[in-house]
Amino acid sequence: MAIVVPLITIVIALVFASMITVGGPSHGQVRGLVGSSFYRVVSFFPYVIPAIVIAILWSMIYAPNGLLNGALGFLGINTNDFAWLGDQRTAMGATIFVIVWSMVGFYMVLFIAAIKGIPAETLEAARIDGAGRYRTVISILLPQMRDNVQTAYIYLGIMALDAFVYMAGLNASGGPNNSTLVMSQYLFRTAFEKGQFGLASAMGVVLAVLTLVFAGLVIGVFRLVGGKDEGGRS
């Protein structure tokens, strides 16, 4: 989860941020899609809802008699009251979707702010040189947003490592065969259900160390991939 959730969230956020800022007409001034402000508000809305509320709402949507199966049945797809969170094949995927859906709006706004900080002259020069939207994003936007993407990946990875609220609301039991059980959830069980507070404390220390190691690895990978800036900063 610490790899998949940040990767999916950042890719989707970058795509939407690019469309909203530079995805407009290929002629004239560089601008985003029509109605970009509306898209921003709609995509950011899930982030302002408390995580536990989101988890409970989606657990109801995923229920065998929930909205998802009802919508699929309306479209002619018979799911036989499928339990999306009760099947090992779909439990983790359904959980990841909820986390990504709730977080992507915030990081899209973050990336939009980063893109707005890039001088318009740079984007205009790229267009004059014949760079299309895809080339502009890959060659102009991403290199100048490296620090923003790095920070987002670290924050999202830490959140995925400690996704207790989402897991507790979606599948408090840990899912079928513990397929959605995360370390923070197991720590809670160890402390408050089994009463093994010493072991739970040790698990908390391990989780903190894993978080630091994860952050260090991400910073190291980004430095390795990004190289050095002109000013010599790695």
Image (cartoon, helix red, strand yellow):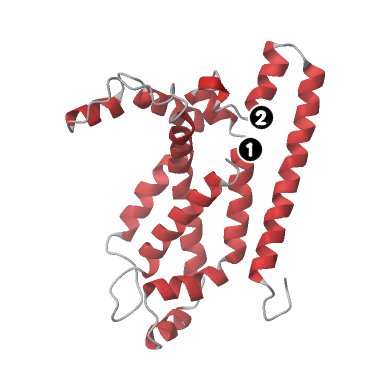
Circles 1, 2 touching at the beta carbon (< 8 Å): yes
Tag 2 or tag 1, which sits nearer the N-term?
1
Q: Quadrant of residue 59?
A: top left
Where residue 56 appears, as percent x and y from the top left, is 44, 24
Which residue in the structure is indicated by mark 1?
161
Q: Give the residue displayed 61% in from the left and 45% down from the top.
A: 157
Secondary element under disc 2, as helix, strand or loop, is: helix
Q: Residues within 10 Å of mark 2 (few under 14, many from 20)?
A: some
Where residue 119 appears, as percent x and y from the top left, is 49, 78
Please name whichever residue, 44 or 87, is drawn nearer the observer in this view of the structure.
87
Secondary element under disc 1, as helix, strand or loop, is: helix
The amino acid at mark 1 is: Leu
Which residue in the structure is indicated by mark 2?
183
Please name whichever residue, 24 or 225, is drawn nearer the observer in this view of the structure.
225
Which residue is the extreme one toward the bottom? 129
Q: Give the residue displayed 56% in from the left and 29% down from the top.
A: 165
Where residue 209 appears, as percent x and y from the top left, is 78, 40
Measured along the vertical axis of the image, is residue 192 above or below residue 108?
Answer: above
